[in-house]
Image (cartoon, helix red, strand yellow):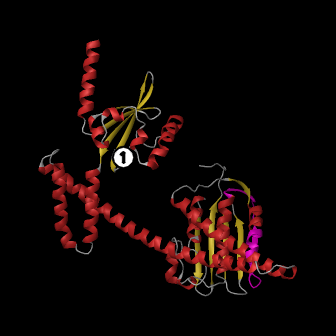
């Protein structure tokens, strides 16, 4: 029995040390118990240097800080982030350089506790090839004929990397398939990069413009307040303090829009459903919107609810109301009328916001719910172009549908249809 056990141990050590991919074994608290030769070479440490070292010492700082919580969370919740799944990460070599690799982790239960075995497949060559492809496509974007020739050169480079594993015919077939797939993915990435570049430019332009005006008002009012030092100038002080408060509120709304879009883009925004009195939510909203309604504009709310207690997220619903109504106020001419109608039937809650303002040009209507989009006739009015994008996303969180009708120079009407959710249970 001991002899068989010894033989098995020798076989395991032989396989362990001769494996092409790196292997690292850690315990439940992240201490390295063993590594094979490939792992030592990848990280540029000797085996003795690595054994006993916390595994986050060979991770970039942003991964190292969170690594301990990953293991603890998994042991508590059993919800894996890498364990049993695998993903691409970066490793930190002894000389401080980083390299990409595919990490898959398996959990093993032993008599004295759990251990985790990580299998490390170096992706440096693959990533270098991808970078070469990116550069190639950037240089030859408008040269379709020349691209074919240069892609053949890339195929030959990839074939050389695969000669040690497969014969030339199998390697060529595999590489060509991967290359076609990579070309498709690369094209999508290029399109996404262009889109992100445009979004960044629009964000910087809009943010700088929108922050400049309220900040200038705050600075000017703060300077003027210091000149009003006696009781006879109290009215002037109050007027400038109100300007500062209004500008701060405006900045807060802009920042809230940016925070909202960040949560929505990252998938962190979720509806928190509860049974709410829709009429109470509307009344609270009416109080909040009052300061935005100037003397030369009229706000006409109308509530016709058969069922007042409905299942929804009150914060999301108020955010939708605020964005739609504040937009209507902003884009309505002097002496204009803004209407808000809330009513329901057996299946749905209906929310209609209409105005007789400047309307939306026909050619701009297809982009109305895009991020940072401003209609051509609204470019001289303050705004980030995020409000309707947020409304669209929040409507989807509530399983609703939003639509609009608009006639340039004659106003716009938005209709939101929210299904009545029963029973009121969060997903």
**Side (left or right) of 91 relative to 15:** right
Tell me if residue 419 comes above or below residue 98 in the rendering. Answer: below
Q: How many marks?
A: 1
The magenta segment: 286-313
Residue at screen point 27% across, 40% down: 41
Q: Report which residue position mark 1 lands on.
A: 91
Tell which of 217 and 423 is nearer to you.
217
Tell me if residue 380 comes above or below residue 136 in the rendering. Answer: below
**Side (left or right) of 412 relative to 293:** left
- Choose top left, top right, bottom left or bottom right for residue 258: bottom right
Residue 53 location (% of width, % of height) = 40, 35
Quick one: label 1, few (<14), some, or many (20+) residues within 10 Å?
Answer: many
Residue at screen point 50% across, 73% down: 204
Tell which of 268 and 88 is nearer to you.
88
**Residue 279 among magenta residues:** no
Residue 127 location (% of width, % of height) = 29, 55
């Amino acid at each position: 029995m001991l002899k068989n056990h010894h033989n098995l141990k020798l076989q395991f050590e032989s396989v362990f040390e001769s494996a092409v991919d790196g292997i690292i074994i850690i315990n439940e608290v992240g201490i390295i118990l063993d590594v094979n030769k490939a792992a030592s070479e990848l990280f540029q440490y000797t085996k003795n240097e690595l054994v006993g070292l916390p595994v986050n010492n060979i991770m970039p700082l942003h991964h190292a800080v969170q690594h301990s919580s990953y293991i603890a969370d998994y042991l508590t919740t059993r919800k894996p982030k890498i364990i049993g799944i695998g993903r691409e990460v970066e490793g930190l070599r002894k000389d401080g350089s980083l390299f990409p690799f595919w990490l898959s982790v398996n959990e093993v239960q032993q008599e004295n506790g759990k251990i985790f075995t990580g299998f490390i497949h170096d992706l440096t060559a693959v990533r270098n090839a991808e970078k070469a492809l990116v550069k190639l496509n950037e240089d030859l974007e408008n040269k379709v004929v020349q691209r074919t020739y240069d892609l053949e050169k890339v195929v030959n480079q990839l074939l050389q990397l695969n000669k040690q594993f497969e014969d030339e015919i199998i390697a060529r077939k595999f590489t060509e398939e991967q290359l076609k797939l990579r070309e498709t993915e690369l094209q999508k990435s290029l399109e996404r990069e262009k889109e992100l570049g445009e979004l960044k430019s629009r964000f910087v332009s809009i943010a700088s413009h929108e922050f400049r005006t309220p900040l200038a008002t705050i600075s000017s009012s703060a300077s003027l307040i210091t000149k009003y030092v006696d009781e006879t100038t109290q009215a002037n002080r109050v007027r400038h303090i109100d300007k500062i408060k209004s500008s701060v509120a405006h900045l807060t709304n802009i920042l809230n829009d940016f925070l909202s879009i960040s949560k929505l883009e990252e998938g962190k925004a979720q509806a928190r459903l509860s049974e709410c009195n829709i009429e109470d939510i509307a009344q609270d909203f009416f109080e909040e919107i009052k300061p935005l309604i100037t003397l030369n504009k009229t706000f006409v709310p109308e509530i016709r609810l058969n069922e007042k207690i409905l299942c929804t997220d009150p914060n999301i619903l108020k955010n939708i109301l605020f964005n739609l109504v504040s937009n209507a106020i902003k884009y309505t001419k002097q002496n204009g009328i803004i209407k808000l109608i809330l009513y329901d039937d057996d299946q749905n809650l209906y929310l209609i916001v209409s105005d007789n303002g400047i309307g939306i040009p026909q050619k701009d209507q297809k982009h109305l719910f895009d991020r940072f989009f401003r209609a051509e006739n609204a470019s001289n009015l303050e705004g980030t172009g995020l409000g309707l994008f947020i409304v669209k996303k929040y409507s989807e969180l509530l399983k609703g549908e939003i639509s609009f009708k608009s006639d340039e120079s004659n106003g716009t009407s938005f209709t939101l249809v929210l299904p009545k959710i029963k029973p009121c249970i969060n997903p």
